[in-house]
Amino acid sequence: MPAPFLFLEEALAVPLNVRHPTDMAAFENLDGDDDWDEGFAGDLVGCTLLAGLTFVDHDDALVRRQQIFGKVESVDRADGIALRCHVSDELVMLAPILDAIEPGQPGIYQLSDADEQVEDPDFTVLLTVRNPLRH
């Protein structure tokens, strides 16, 4: 069974049991450049990642926020960042926007969705997920 994907253009952020048809390589870097850092991508594997996801509708109105934390299992330009969630053990795919990933600052992070705390993540990332206008 293929890894569940996080629908990055939908307002829902639940892991799915089907592979998303979007090629993750279609997501642009924040600065619009197409610089893929293969070395950094490889360095992420095995590291812990705390991801903050903000979901907005097509008018940029807030729908909801979600935080996920886990260990990076793989990073691929076309397939995305495979993150094994610490709490649920589900595999979630994030867009491979490497320039959005920052080294984690030492400390304890309180996840807003649960009583879970994360201590000293290796990396953090903030992503905005925009739901397209549907007619």
Image (cartoon, helix red, strand yellow):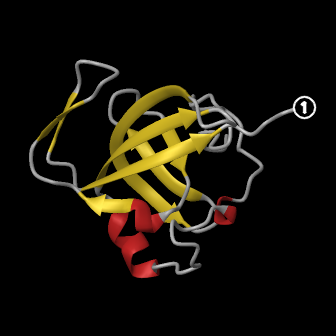
Observer-nearest residue: 125 or 118? Answer: 125
Q: How many marks?
A: 1
Q: Is residue 63 visible?
A: yes
Q: Residue at x 58, y 30 (%)?
A: 61
Reading the image, the residue beneath label 1 is: 135
Residue 20 x %, y %: 72, 45
Point out the image quarter for the N terminus. Answer: top right
Residue 85 x %, y %: 39, 37
Q: Is residue 45 visible?
A: no
Q: What amino acid is at disc 1?
A: His
Is 20 on the left or on the right of 32, as rendered?
A: right
Is 96 on the left or on the right of 1, as rendered?
A: left
Is 62 on the left or on the right of 16, as rendered?
A: left
Task: Classify mark 1: residues with Cα within 10 Å, few (<14), some (14-19) or many (20+).
Answer: few
Q: Residue at x 29, y 57 (%)?
A: 47
Residue 40 x %, y %: 37, 75
Q: Residue at x 59, y 39 (%)?
A: 6
Residue 107 x %, y %: 9, 44
Point out the residue furthest to the right here. 135
Q: Label 1's element?
A: loop
On screen, 110 above or below 121? above
Occupied quadrant, residue 32: bottom right
